[in-house]
Amino acid sequence: MRVDTDPYLERYAARVRGMRASEIRALFAVASRPEVVSFAGGMPDTSVLDMEAVEAVTAQVIREDGATALQYGGGQGREQLRELLVEVMRHEGVPGRTDELIVTVGGQQALELIAKCFVDPGDIVLAEGPTYVGGLGALNSHQAEVRHIDMDADGLRIDLLEDELARIAADGRRPKLLYTIPNHQNPAGVSLTVERRHRLAELAEQHDLLILEDNPYGLLDFAGRTNPSLRELIPDRVVYVGTVSKTIAPGLRTGWIAAPAPIRDKLVLLREAADLCPSNLTQMIVERWLVSQPWREQIKRFTTVYHEKAEAMLGSLSEHMPDGVDWTVPAGAFYVWLTVPAGIDTSDLLAKAVNHRVAYVPGRGFYADGNGGQQARLCFSYPEVARIGDGVARLGELLHEELDLVRAVFGDDVPPARRRHEGPTGNRGG
Amino acid sequence: MRVDTDPYLERYAARVRGMRASEIRALFAVASRPEVVSFAGGMPDTSVLDMEAVEAVTAQVIREDGATALQYGGGQGREQLRELLVEVMRHEGVPGRTDELIVTVGGQQALELIAKCFVDPGDIVLAEGPTYVGGLGALNSHQAEVRHIDMDADGLRIDLLEDELARIAADGRRPKLLYTIPNHQNPAGVSLTVERRHRLAELAEQHDLLILEDNPYGLLDFAGRTNPSLRELIPDRVVYVGTVSKTIAPGLRTGWIAAPAPIRDKLVLLREAADLCPSNLTQMIVERWLVSQPWREQIKRFTTVYHEKAEAMLGSLSEHMPDGVDWTVPAGAFYVWLTVPAGIDTSDLLAKAVNHRVAYVPGRGFYADGNGGQQARLCFSYPEVARIGDGVARLGELLHEELDLVRAVFGDDVPPARRRHEGPTGNRGG
């Protein structure tokens, strides 16, 4: 049995209301035990990689060009790599040119640099509700005022975005940007429909809105489908972020930004102030991987595994969840977004869940405004497929117990839901 | 002959007064030609490394623990690595505990995170004059008001620091921190004497001053000597930065911060917002290098090579430089700081120098306030030793020509020096 160590849990838990550092650490220690099935960390299953190929590629880089691999490099990243990343984008239909790209330390550094470039303290930034905790981290560290726009099964609700833009304009203000993950969103597990992409593009034109399009999961559709990118629809209004963390491996810490030239130049200066340059070694490993390995096939192997795990999770949810629990049905990537009945708080429940040998990330981690108390993110990409059913059964058992408690206290008079917004629900698979 | 590609030159040149991006790029393209001897980039000589050992260590990491190496890790960095970095610090006499360390993407990310943690726009930050261009980059990107304190052959002038602290207090203000590189300073090539370290520690206590001690070069003393660190003298007032970029290799992008616990916790949160975590792969390569390779001997091999190159440069400077040119005599690391006579501007001269097939970094790159017009940094660590003499001879020839021009125009009536401050000079080796 593999040990589900989970470096992610701690940083998510830090956003959960009311938990102290010491409690988080204690919880983290327990959640990392092998007997706990962790649906917390948003980690790819690196065991799917051909390790012999990785070893061969890496050794070759050092043998043939070690002095360069171990030296400093340029702040924009290696041209050879950027050329190949343009091919990766093209595989998904996203347009791009080598000179428009900046290689970053994973997608997270891309988000940080873009936040540093655009966000002044107090600036309004629009984002999906819920949204990626690392995106919130980057935005918050530059003191953005994040306003969430609710989602449904079709992704970001463009009607609500339009309302919010009108409200902001009525206040005589302007949002700095919209942060969106259109494909297989983290944590909601839903994608923006094609029709809504076009409506979003029109709205962006009308309101002169800058869009931060974060796309870690676009190539992980279970059926191999792709959607038109916002970068394709409105290239001048989009700063695009990609990463190899989910298509090759996160340990290579390689992501990128594609941006119009004036923004690119600013971002390169900020990146040099941030860490001088990305590692030549890891860049050259990615290059050689893309040149010498069947990377498109490797991505298919990943999605086949994730599809199988998603099916396992969805089947178990239907089997084990009590009435009143709802969840999204992902068509790709890593995540199911769970909504529990009113009266249960997923932050409060986490310690009990870990005690029941199952872990998740409480929904509040994905909101800047305290919402998400009735939600949880379940990530199915990392645990072994055979353990997913066990984990879901344990969570189901706990939720049954909790609901019995709620009913014992309140009878049919369940307490009102704490969340103000509607989240993406209603596509329950059962 | 090795090609002296120079990713550094562009970022330094960007700080040089009056140069446009297009000019910088053109200059950079020329300076990267193999016939140019570049003293510009502050790059270690990675050809000194045992590449077979690097290849073996890397392959072993992937073979034995590939799934971990390619996965996400924790934001503070791997505990195993931090333990070993404490040993590296101890080798230099710097105290530290595993839990006080944060692994960063090179020393540059350490500087960026510390700047982000402490510096609000307009805050006064004290720094040596001249100082590391990347330190200035990190501080400027957070809109610090950098005030330089002059140096001499014994390092930072503590008497001038005391004056500046008094001036700031008289204005009712406080400096956020003092940024210092006490050992073999970049770019000045001088070290802070032991006596001044003690005076600096006293001053810091008196004025409640936080010190950012940046120590990339402490283990590169040509005679293997070490100095007491400020962290040793006043641990509670020091945030310490180390890196393996000069003792192993910069392509591994591995540095670290050692800081008191409350500061460490803030920095870990900022690091997670910045790029989630350092690469497990490169961390594990560094770990295995430190565990399995004779790293202390490797550092000696580096310093032996750099000592030989320093001697070559100092000998050639004595032979080829015209009267009125002065330079520092380094006892370790990478750099000679050159001062040319009044009437010559090193920024203006750079294009001509590159035309003469020699490159350096103009002194203005190392000041936030426009000083340094009569200075240049010559880095001897990277070019092959046989080419150093040629490069210095070309620069000497150019300076002779320029001085003839200055004399033809002004006669004995040389124009006044443009710099307000005294820099470290007066230890001319000739």
Image (cartoon, coloured by chain):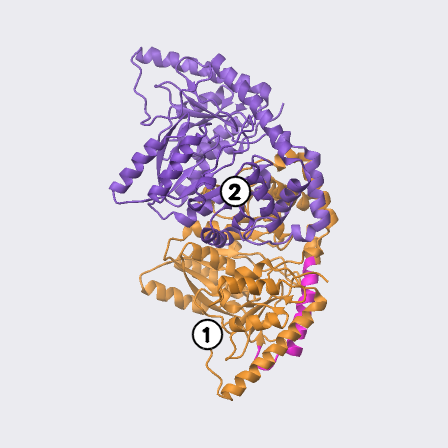
Chain colours: A purple, B orange
Q: Quadrant of residue B336?
A: bottom right
Residue A377 in sight in this render: yes
**Which is the main secondary structure of the residues drawn in magenta?**
helix
Tell me which residue sits at (53%, 83%) in the image: B406
Q: Does residue B370 appear left or right of residue A38 in this picture?
A: left
Q: Does residue A175 appear left or right of residue A4 in this picture?
A: left
Residue A13 locus on image (x, y percent)? 45, 31
Tell me which residue sits at (62%, 57%) in the image: B219
- Secondary structure category for the residue under label 2: loop
* Circle 1 residue: B419
Q: Type of residue at label 2?
A: Pro
Q: What number is the disc on residue A401? A: none
In the image, residue B98 above or below residue B135: above
Tell me which residue sits at (62%, 49%) in the image: A80
Q: CA distance from mark 1 to mark 2?
A: 50 Å
Dot 1: chain letter: B
* Nearer mark to the viewer, of 1 and 2: 2
Residue B309 locus on image (x, y percent)? 68, 66
Within 10 Å of the Cα at label 1, are there few (<14), some (14-19), or many (20+) other Cα atoms? Answer: some
Extent of the magenta region: B302-325
* Circle 2 residue: A95
